[in-house]
Structures are given as structure tokens and as C-alpha cells.
Image (spheres, helix red, strand yellow):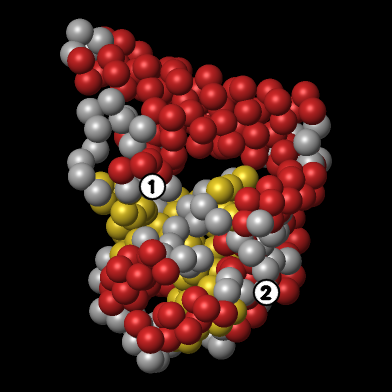
Amino acid sequence: MRKVSVILSTYTTKKLVDVSRCIASLKKQTLEPSEIILVVDRRELMWFYRKNIPKDVRIVLSNGIGVSQARNTGIRNAKEQFVAFIDDDAMADRDWLENLCRNFDDPEVYCVGGFVEPIWEKKCPEWFPEELNWIIGCAMKGLPIRKASIRNPMGCNMSFRKDVFETAGFFNPNFGKLQGKSIIGEELDLCRRISQKVSKSKVIYEPSAIVYHRVPNNRTTLTYVFTRSFFEGLSKAIIENESKEINVLSVENDFRKYLLRVSIPSKLRLIHRREKLLQLLAILVSMFSVFVGYGIGKCARIKRSQFAHARIKGKLSNAS
């Protein structure tokens, strides 16, 4: 039976209920984690969570700020040969870890990701289509329905052989959430390096490995859709600016074709129904925002180091 270190991180005391639920779901796994590591970025958070979560959960202080730094700290502190990641506002299905890790029986598999199902704080708005589930960090319509090779997993639900980080490097801290704000693409950036540096490496999507991701009400607004889509486009432009690969954004191009050839026409056929009309408009708003972000990133030739400097400078100025 494989031994796995499960890593989650948080940056606020306001996530105590979420963190507690997540840890409780990890303790009920059919494949029990060897250890659960909670990474925080301030000492006062260490003291707070030590008083409020189970004593057997290891709490470690991040070496920096942002989710990528927190993940890297978790990896460096992990004792086992496999590491799995879950978000602080997610809960794992009972078979989650077992279904992820059985894929490592294949020695060429270095990363496995799973399915992320949304749990709406109230209910899914009628105007929000499944095709935009990626905006809320969940599995979108159009993903494979069976196990398949993929380019990169969703960060809320993924696992790795720990030794791959020594070969391919760790998560790049210039990507990832920073105090709730983000430049997206840390999983893509890492998996690109794995494919380049580890011969015959495989990244697998395992839809039976399920986590349930809470979707707060503030993510169910058109403003959030527009903003999140903009940063998606900007992030992918930054990745493409630094990549020497011709088809580094092939997955995004395929998804755009899916929207244009399948999703949008299907909604146009039912445009007389209010919810289909609204969902169509939401998809168009998102696509427009992605293209704006991508266009700005490409025209300005923005690099991740430049953007990271601006993000950190903005964070520090906001805190002062």
C-alpha cells in the first residue's frame, strides 16, 4: 500500500470551518494518508490552527507568500515518496486518495489529477454554464469522461511522485494565488517541465478521484467571471511568451474550438429558453475577457518575473 503525504495550505483564520471539513474528509480515506500537512504563511496562523485542528496534523510555516511557495514548503517537509494536494475549501471523496494513487503502479506516471465537483454556497445561477466551471476551480464540460493522458491537472486535486521535483524543479512562485489574487498557470508550468526533463513521463486524469470544491457567492457574479477570465488570458500569454514550444496552448485552443463548434451552437438552438440565452452571453463575456487579457500579455510581452514583482509590490502597499 502506497504511503502518501497530503498537503493543503491556507492564509487566513476565516477558513477554519473549511480547513476542518477538509481535514475530516482526509481522515476518512480508504487509503489513509501517512501524514496531513497544513502550510500557513504567518506565525500567528500556526498558533491559531494548532489550537483548532487535530493535533496529528503537521503545521509548517511557508518559506514565502502565495500558494506556489506554500506547496513547495509542503513538498520539502513531506516524508513520503508520494504527495497529494487539495485546497483548503475542498473536501475529498472517501476513495479519492486510493483512486489517485493506483495510477502510480505505472512507473511512467509522475502526476495524477482528478475530478473537481462544485458545491455551491447557495445554488448555481441559471446563467452560469458548466463550460465555465474552470473559472470556479472545478471540472468543466468538455473534459474526458474516462481516464486519459492530459497536459496538467487542476491544482485542487492532484498528486505527484515526490522525486520528480528534484528533476523538474518545484512550483514557480511567480505563478499561483497570492492572498486571494492570482496569475494562473503554476500546474501547467510545472507539468511542462516534467514532460521536458523526464523521458516518457505521463500525466493522467483519473475522473474517479473526486474532490468537492465549495463555491462562495462572490464567485457567482459576472464581474468575477470577467476578471478571472482576463487573468486566465494574461497568464497563458505570459507562459507562451516564455515558452519555446509551438503548441504550448494546444489544450486551450482545443477548448476554444469546442466552445465554437459544440457549446455555442447547442445554446443557439435553444436560445428561446432564458437560461440558455444567459449562459451563451456568459460564455461570450468570458471568451472576450480571455482574449483581452491574452492580447495585452502578448502585445506588452509581459514576463512572469515582471508580473510577480508588481503583484508583491501591490500586496505590500495594500498591507501598509
**Helix or strand or loop: what does disc 1 sit on?**
loop
For label 1, the crowd category at 10 Å Cα-Cα, with few meaning under 14, some 14 to 19 and many 20 or more, is many
Tag 1: amino acid: Cys
Residue shown at the point (20%, 41%) measured from the top left: 123
Q: Quadrant of residue 29?
A: bottom left
In the current view of this chain or complex, which residue is farthest to the front?
A: 320
In-front residue for pair 10/271? 10
Coordinates of residue 131 in the picture (x, y in percent): 37, 32
Q: Answer with left or right where residue 34 lies relative to residue 26.
A: right
- Residue 222: mark: none
Name above or below for residue 14 compared with residue 220: below
In-front residue for pair 94/122? 122
Tally of marks: 2
Coordinates of residue 66 in the picture (x, y in percent): 61, 61
Name above or below for residue 314 compared with residue 159: above
- Quarter that holds the C terminus: bottom right
Q: Quadrant of residue 92?
A: bottom left
- Residue 138: mark: 1
Kindly report the distance in space between the C-alpha atoms of the residues bearing marks 1 and 2.
28 Å
Residue shown at the point (39%, 34%) measured from the top left: 132
- Quarter that holds the N terminus: bottom left
Q: Answer with left or right where residue 150 lies relative to residue 146.
A: right
Coordinates of residue 43 in the picture (x, y in percent): 57, 80
**Helix or strand or loop: what does disc 2 sit on?**
loop
Residue shown at the point (59%, 36%) measured from the top left: 231
Residue carrying label 2: 63
Tag 2: amino acid: Asn
Q: Earlier in the sequence, mark 1 or mark 2?
A: 2
